Image (cartoon, coloured by chain):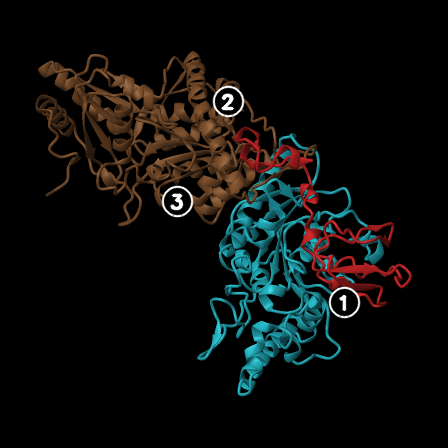
Chain colours: A brown, B red, C cyan
Amino acid sequence: MAVRERLSGNEAVAYAIKQINPDVMPAFPITPSTEIPQYVANYIANGEIDTEFIPVESEHSAMSATVGASAAGARALTATSSCGLALMWEELYVAASNRLPIVLALVNRALSGPININADHSDSMGARDSGWIQIYAESNQEVYDNFLQAFLIAEHKDVMLPVMICQDGFITSHGVENILLVEDDQVKEFVGEREPEHYLLNPNETLAVGPYAVSSYYMETKRGQREAMINARKVILEVANRFQAMTGRQYGFFEAYRLEDADYAVVIIGSAAGTCKAAIEEIRNTTGKKVGLLKIRVFRPFPEEEIAAALTHVKAVAILDRSEMFSATSGPLGAEVRAALYQAKGTAETVNYFYGLGGRDITVEDFCQVYDNLEKIAAEHKVTDMYEYIGLRS
Amino acid sequence: MISDRINENSPWQDITEGNKIFEAATSKEFCTGEWRTSTPVWDQEKCKQCLLCTPVCPDSSIPVCDQKREDFDYDHCKGCGICAKVCPFGAITMKEGK
Amino acid sequence: MEAYNFKEIMSKPERLAPGHRMCAGCGGTIAVRGVLRALHEGDKAVVGNATGCLEVSSFMYPYTAYEDSYIHNAFENAGATLSGVETAYRVLKKRGKLKEDYKFITFGGDGGTYDIGFQSLSGAMERGHDMVYVCYDNGAYMNTGTQRSSATPQFADTTTTPAGKVSNGKVQIRKDLAAIMAEHHIPYVGQTTFTANFKDLHTKAEKAIYTPGAAFLNVLAPCPRGWGYEPSDLMDICKAAVDTCYWPLYEVVDGKWSITYEPKEKLPIEDFLRSQRRFRHLFKPGNEELIAEFQREVDRRWEELQVKCSK
């Protein structure tokens, strides 16, 4: 029986951590993820779990200690946001290349500067090349569900990669929503315990981790990481299927919302998908225009073929980025989705939008305008500006 | 030998996951003795087995067994000469070359 | 603690294998061997390592020089990394997944310890992880080619503080890291180097490893290339460092400071400086005042240490 609750996204993640009762959690406070280690510290203080919490002195040390704990054989995780993730940068790559099944609860927040505490994806998008699996959520329910699946994906013997479970700062992390929680014993059975193969504290085997690998080995190592990412595709879907069997809630690489018959589509990541869905309902109900949404859940590995296939019939696509990458031509999602369409010889017109940077609001009306623009672009076969902004004053 | 399994001709599939090595002390296979430009020579007659030469070796190349040193591990000795300098009995001399 | 029987201790199995790529005459691996020798036979350990000469030379894929399990992570985080390993150990023990006992020892050069890894070290010590952080201090960034660190002594000629027509080498005096670690009020801090029978290093390493809680060991580990001396002279250099009181041997046990070796006759600092190329410019005519200044700093610190130890 599922348990009905009202929780914020941070509480939901902390509750998932409580249900998993992992071995080690080093963490450092940063808005808006701070609540997660706070909740966990409280569970520990009240004897509800016996995870070891390490109150480290920086995010770099948080990920360093997580790497140490995971290499030692423990199930280890941490949580952070924004500049905290930036300070971990070096360690993200180390965790991935060491093939450590770490889970990171990331509460997305804009990177400095200027300093800003609100949601955008500049933190995790910057880390997209680090070798981590990245899974995003629209709602509190999704971030909870994603978190419960994270260790199973990370620790799968064909994967052995770290997993970043992302949610939008304040919007879901602090927004309280109705949520269905899985029963504790069901979570225990679903997630199980980590059974490491090679680990530092194995009394029967001496292990050395973290060598200097000269050019004769580096490239082969990276190829091995790619293979793990390829394998992750299958494992992510397998775990999602098992999760669906337990909860009835279905997950894949992305959610196709009213996309099947759509002429115009938005591609987006994260909480703004909810606003987009409201716009879709409004447009369909009032005008009958066929508009739809592709909400990306798994950004790494990038489900290129699947995305292209889902968009083949669409006349025009707006790809919405919540972070800059300053190529001056596109955002990260825009670049990759367009590459996917090109590779699949897609015929849809595309336009890249920037929205929500540093927590700027996006409204139903904004999405309605995006769909209007798509209709115009499809009719004229002409994109006047490939680099549109939503809500930018000019 | 680990070098039979992992070497610079190994395909990527043979590189261990996360570059982890699941064995101890595989460095022994690598012969640093080839670096030597001068070589310590141990005179067993003069040696009083005081063992002062053993801890100063940066290359763990003076084996000790039951409180007695044995001859140099020439596969690994780099010929730095610290041992010869600390020997109080002149039992180690450095000779030119390998 | 085991009684110090030199010959017995020298007969213990080696825990740092040969075949590593450190330079001939390197003080770093002498320090590592010396510290690991203090582990009791049969005791298991996980060895950590900051990036540096030692790391890139002792674990070049696929060749590890360690008999024990080993983890290198990055340059600035040896303290945090091992604190993660040690915490994993405690939780696996607590949950009945591990029966064996382990010790945790991590090595970093002075660059990775005094400078870039200082915060990570301080954090690990303050949190009180049951581990030993060993700094093998060769007074500069040797792995990248002898750049100055905060452990570099004043006036040393390094590649980023070169002695030149208008420069006398490094301007600043060196940071006193062992004292800073003692001020963390951890149970054990030791400063040592190589003495003839290695008793000082061995005893301190053993105390550091077997004292419950966080411990810090600072080991002067000469670098023939960076300092500019004949590799075979290593032990003379160490002796001069100690007998001039440039590098006093002391320990701080539960807040109690004590000098573990008092030179019979305190030698002038020139005896330490003279044989090293990095101080060659100090011996040019007209630079006598620089040596006098160096001497005053050594004297000041030695006196300060004596006061701390008399309490």
The label nearer to you, 3 versus 1, is 1
Asked where in the image residue A1 lies, by quadrant, the reply is: top left
Residue A84: give its label: 3
Q: Chain of mark 1?
A: B
Look at the numbered discs 3 and 2 and tell me whether their residues touch, using CB distance below 8 Å: no
Q: Is residue A26 visible?
A: no
Q: Secondary structure at mark 2?
A: helix
The label nearer to you, 1 versus 2, is 1
Q: Chain of mark 2?
A: A
Q: Residues within 10 Å of mark 2 (few under 14, many from 20)?
A: some
User: Which residue carries the number 1 mark?
Assistant: B85
Q: CA distance from mark 3 to mark 1?
A: 52 Å
Query: Do the residues at discs 3 and 2 belong to one chain?
Result: yes
Q: CA distance from mark 3 to mark 2?
A: 27 Å
Residue extending farthest to the bottom is C286
Q: Residues within 10 Å of mark 1 (few under 14, many from 20)?
A: some
In the picture provided, is A172 more to the left or to the right than C149? left
